[in-house]
Image (cartoon, helix red, strand yellow):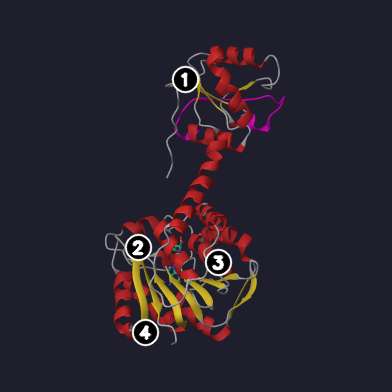
Amino acid sequence: MTKKIQHGNGSKPILIFPGGMPRSLEYLQNCLRDGLPVIGASSLDYDVSREKYPSWLFLPYIAQSGFDEALKQAIVEFGIGGVYSPNPVVWGYLNRKLKDIAPGVALVNESPVGAELSGYRAARAWARSRLDQPLPVASALMPKTHLSEIELASLFRHAELIPGMCDCEKFCALYEIARRSPAGDVVEIGSWWGKSAFILARLARCYGIGNLLCVDPWSNEHLVQNDEKGLVDAESARLDAEEALAVFEMNLLPYSANHVNYLRMPSTDGAKHYREHRSATTSSFGTTSYCGHIAILHIDGNHSYAAAKADIASWSGFVVDGGWMIVDDYIWPYGDGPQRAGDEFLAENKDRIDVAFVMGSALLVQLSHAA
Ligand SMILES: C[S@@+](CC[C@H](N)C(=O)[O-])C[C@H]1O[C@@H](n2cnc3c(N)ncnc32)[C@H](O)[C@@H]1O
C-alpha cells in the first residue's frame, strides 16, 4: 500500500539533504508521486543524483563553519517549509540546531536510526511473545526445542521483507507444526513471490526436516480462480507471472544452498514428476533430490474447488504418518473451494487424522503417526 507523504508545512518545499542517499531518493519519489514540492541538496561539488530533483542547491558539510548560515539563507531564499534527512548524524545535528537556525522549520522525518530499527525491534518483540506464549498443539509427536529468540526474530524479519500472503497466525502455526514434524520432503503448491516458501525453507532447515519443493506454473492462465464476484480474478489479471518467478528466485536463492528447488508446472503434473523423478533441476537452483515422501504439504495454489480438490487428491497420498497438510485460505472471503475440498478430506480420512485446527485462515491437519 502506498503511504501518503506528510509534508510538514503546507505547500512549501521540503529540503532533502543529503539528496543522494537511497532513503532520500525513495522520499523524493513519493513526493513527486504526490505532487509535493521538493529541493535536493548535497555537500558534494557534483552529486549524480541532482538530475533527479526538480530543484537543487549546494550546502557545506555540517561540520564546516559556514553550514548554519548557508542553510538559513537557503531556507529564506527558497521558502523551505521542512527538512528531510535520512543521515543519522545530519538528522541529529538538525534536531538540535534547526530551531535556532530557522524557527518554525522542522525535520519532517523521525530519527533515521529508529526508523531503520523499528522492523527489527518488532520482530524481536514478536519472537519474544511467541516464546512466552507458545501455541499449544495437541500432537502426539513431542515438540523439538524452540528456536532462540534471535533465530525466530530473524526468520520473522526476513519473511516480512518478502511480499506475499502469510499472516502472523499462520506463521505461528507453521512454526509450531515444524517443531512437531517427522522427517521428509516439504512441498508447497503455489509459491508466487516465495513468502511462505521462505518460511518453510528456513523452518525445514532449522528442524532438519528435509528439502523444499515448490510447485507452481507461474503462468497468468493458472491465476484464474473464478472467484464468486470476480474481484480476485480482476486483480490477478494485472499481475505478471514471469516477473513473479524472478522475484521468487531472488527471494529464495540466498537461502537455498541445495535444499530448495521448484517445478514450473501445475500441481497435478508436478505430482507425476515427483513420483517418477524425486528430483528437480532448474538453472537457478541446480539439482535438488527429494526422498519421495512428504513431511509437510502446504497447499496454496488455485483456490477454485476443482483445483483445491485436485491438489489434495494428487499430493496428500505422499504425506507420511505424523506428517502435516495445510490448506491455505480454508477461510477465504471470495469462495469456498479450499474449505469444501479440505472438509471432504477430513471426512474421508477421519480415521487417520490426529490433529486438525484452523489458525488465521489456514486449516492444519496432522495425519496419525504410527504407534
Ligand atoms: C495465493 S498464491 C501463493 C502465495 C504464496 N504461497 C505466498 O506465501 O505468498 C497462489 C499461487 O498458486 C499458483 N497456482 C495456480 N494454479 C496452480 C496449480 N494448478 N498448481 C500449482 N500452483 C498453482 C499461482 O501461480 C500462484 O503463484
Which secondary structure, mark 4?
Answer: helix
Spatial separation of the CA atoms under disc 1 and disc 2 = 46 Å
What residue does disc 1 label?
12
Q: Which x, y percent locates residue 222?
A: 42, 68
Spatial separation of the CA atoms under disc 4 and disc 3 = 27 Å
Which secondary structure, mark 2?
Answer: loop
The amino acid pointed to by label 2 is Ser
Q: Which mark is residue 360?
A: none
| Sequence order check, earlier mark of 1 and 3 | 1
* Picture quarter with the C terminus: bottom left
What residue does disc 4 label?
352
What residue does disc 3 label?
201
Q: What residue is shown at x 48% (from left), y 62% (from top)?
A: 196
Q: Residues within 10 Å of mark 3 (few under 14, many from 20)?
A: many
The amino acid pointed to by label 3 is Ala
Quadrant in which ligand 1 is drawn: bottom left
- State the extent of the magenta-drawn residues as a range: 32-51
